[in-house]
């Protein structure tokens, strides 16, 4: 292990990342749709760690290096904050008095936080009965107004679009292009730290806005002379929610990875282009593989992510097992590749999936020997 | 509000923070007890945002600027990671095969994560029956071995100390001085960003290791010529767990702020020195004030913290209300002071305290008018 630790700490490989904690607009202003008069609403998002993974690197082998872009360390615990700072800043510039979105998860949490920061209201519209309150804790904590409707998610999105026609509301669902613009900054940060683009970039694929944003970011940065190469983009869908993989809308998407439980992605076409133009692939991983990868990552690298974030890790494992016929087999990975996996949200976002791991504890006598015995039992 | 946003984004006030995501040892190696041969175990901790709070600044007034050091954006969601990277790196250097601690909260989460990263075991010893599993989700997620004993917390700590005598175990409770050493880095970061120490530093006061660490960090940095001044250190205890404020051990400490529910702080004397030498104070805030400050901060600045982290915010409010006879009254705060409040942990650490805010949702008809009516009702 010693050599792995040394590599974790090798200074030559990674450049300095300036401007941490200032937010992505302060750092990448010239690449974003803001002007000097845009009031910046930021919570210090971005600048997340790019963590070298010695064990994933060893699994891939052949001199490859695997890095985790730990987006769970954004202010509300997910990558959504990168886009939200841009979307909310632009909304304030236009004079919006409220944000509105249809979301039960990371988008509503981020919208609620940035609305609070901006001093405007946030409205979250949801189908009644589909609301797991655990996922809404953040929306309530940040003071959002949550409205439940007698209808499905499409109804909620339709109403959000209707209300978004009014001057006082700004829609912050992923149809808002400012969000994609902000999410590009994660690609910029990776290039800034590695000195060039990685060879491969793996990420979860749900609504497909993030793969679209990363690909746009990598291309823009190359066109600006900040990097020389482009990565292959590999997107991983949950097997029960894989419309892009199967090439058809999934009416009832099902997966434990709620953040990618999407049957009809908003950025479907853009994602297909990103995969095609980058010579990447879309592949699927099962819920079992996702949960195993999640637990593996927490127990082997100390990085706890929400289930959706484990999809690219499960995907990387799949790529490394020729017998499982992945869409992007091991042998296609160039030697000495730098591989980045984006892990999109913190594990604390969805603690319930860990419930099975909370074993019942039988109390032992309060002495050294009994505690040692209990330790050695396991 | 516009001028507040402008100030949030004013570049002249805050310097560049280099080395984000590399971890605190990589960034501050010369100030830490590591050598070139120490294997560094890091998860990219530190480099957390220093968020300007326009509304707290307005409340304090008189040209003061209030900043939030958002330690919830560390890898396991609390400031403990700063000390744990040092403690675990040193433990690996000494050849330890396991970490051991008695903790139900942030320390066990951090220890479990860094043990996983280091490839060694983590043992958490706890009193049976006192275990709220929600607080232990992270320890289980990172694969720690949790042992419940028939005894109280003192028994657990005694056993941990006994086992810590063995070569293969490394104690990572706060009696481990490497943890305090690592926690100093938060003070370094604040000085690096502000260009000097702030005039006031407010933080929660529980086991008192953090106030000890910050004070040591500010002094070391000044002695190294990195800053010219030192802040007054203001520590806030929960009214039901205020041994330092009252000058006596509290046998049954009670507060909703579990991270500072401590009746006999490990760093009691060092904390008293920090407060005395810095011309600061120790004061108390009630659970009601803590919960109000927590909700205020989330809904007014978009920063969601665990209850203990809201203690300094409640404390700042108290300082600003002369009628409440705070130990450090408003009038003592110098004009144009820079005031930093450390918020120690992310709100997602303790979602249960938000349960009261999860209002019951009555579904409305799925059309624009009904949704608008529901929005306007509130």
Image (cartoon, coloured by chain):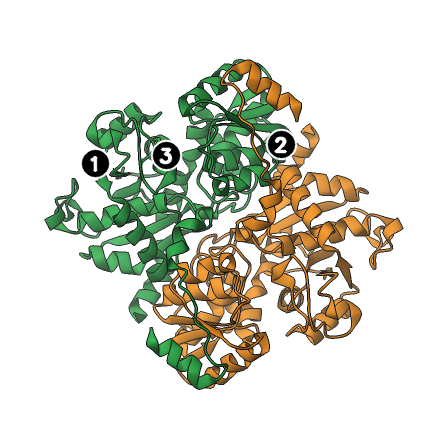
Chain colours: A orange, B green
Q: Do labels 3 and 2 share a chain?
A: yes
Q: How crowded is mark 3: few (under 14 residues within 10 Å), some or many (20 or more)?
A: many
The label on residue A112 is: none
**Label 1: chain letter:** B
Disc with the residue nearer the chain's start (3 vs 2): 2
Give the x, y percent position of residue A96.
Answer: 39, 78
Q: Mark 2 points at which residue?
A: B118
Disc with the residue nearer the chain's start (1 vs 2): 2
Gap between marks 1 and 2 measured at Cα? 39 Å
User: Where is A150 relative to A22, above or below?
Assistant: below
Q: Are marks 3 and 1 in contact (CB under 8 Å)?
A: no
User: Where is A68 relative to A5, above or below?
Assistant: below
Q: Is residue B222 visible?
A: no
Left or right of B63, for residue A349? right
**Label 2: chain letter:** B
**Residue A261's quadrant in the figure?**
bottom right
Q: Name the residue under label 3.
A: B210
Question: Which quadrant is home to the N terminus of chain B?
Answer: bottom left
Question: Which quadrant is home to the C terminus of chain B?
Answer: bottom left
Gap between marks 3 and 2 measured at Cα? 24 Å
Q: Name the residue under label 1.
A: B281
Disc with the residue nearer the chain's start (3 vs 1): 3
Give the x, y percent position of residue B323.
Answer: 10, 50
Q: Which residue is drawn at 38% across and 38% down?
A: B259
Of residues B313 and B63, the one drawn nearer to the viewer in this rendering: B313
Q: Residues within 10 Å of mark 2 (few under 14, many from 20)?
A: many
Of residues B369 and A141, the one drawn nearer to the viewer in this rendering: B369
Q: Is residue A133 visible?
A: yes
Give the x, y percent position of residue A253.
Answer: 68, 67
Q: Are marks 1 and 2 in contact (CB under 8 Å)?
A: no
Helix, strand or loop at label 3? It is helix
């Amino acid at each position: 292990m010693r050599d792995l630790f040394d590599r974790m700490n090798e200074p030559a490989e990674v450049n300095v990342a300036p401007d941490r904690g200032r937010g992505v607009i302060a750092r990448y202003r010239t690449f974003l749709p803001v002007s000097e008069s845009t009031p910046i609403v930021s919570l210090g998002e971005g600048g997340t760690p790019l963590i070298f993974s010695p064990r994933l690197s060893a699994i891939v082998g052949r001199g490859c290096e695997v890095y985790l872009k730990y987006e769970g360390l954004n202010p509300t615990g997910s990558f959504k904050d990168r886009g939200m700072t841009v979307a909310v800043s632009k909304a304030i510039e236009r004079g919006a008095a409220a944000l509105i979105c249809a979301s039960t998860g990371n988008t509503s949490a981020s919208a609620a936080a940035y609305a609070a920061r901006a001093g405007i209201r946030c409205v979250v519209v949801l189908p009644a009965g589909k609301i797991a309150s655990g996922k809404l804790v953040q929306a309530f904590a940040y003071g959002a107004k949550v409205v439940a409707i007698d209808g499905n998610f499409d109804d909620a999105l339709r109403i959000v679009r209707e209300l978004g026609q009014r001057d006082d509301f700004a829609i912050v669902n992923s149809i808002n292009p400012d969000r994609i613009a902000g999410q590009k900054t994660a690609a910029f940060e990776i290039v800034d730290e590695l000195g060039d683009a990685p060879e491969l970039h793996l990420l979860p694929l749900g609504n497909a806005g993030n793969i679209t944003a990363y690909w746009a970011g990598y291309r823009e940065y190359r066109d600006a002379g900040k990097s020389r190469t482009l990565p292959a983009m590999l997107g991983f869908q949950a097997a029960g929610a894989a419309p892009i993989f199967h090439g058809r809308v999934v009416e009832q998407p099902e997966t434990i990875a709620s953040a990618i439980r999407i049957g009809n992605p908003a950025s479907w076409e853009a994602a297909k282009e990103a995969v095609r133009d980058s010579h990447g692939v879309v592949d699927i991983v099962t819920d079992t593989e996702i949960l195993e990868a999640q637990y593996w990552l927490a127990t082997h690298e100390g990085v706890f992510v929400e289930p959706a974030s484990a999809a690219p890790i499960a995907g990387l494992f799949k790529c490394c097992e020729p017998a499982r016929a992945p869409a992007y087999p091991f042998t296609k990975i160039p030697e000495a590749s730098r591989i980045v996996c984006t892990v999109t949200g913190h594990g604390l976002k969805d603690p319930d999936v860990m419930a099975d791991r909370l074993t019942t504890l039988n109390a032992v006598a309060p002495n050294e020997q009994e505690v040692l015995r209990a330790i050695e039992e396991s």
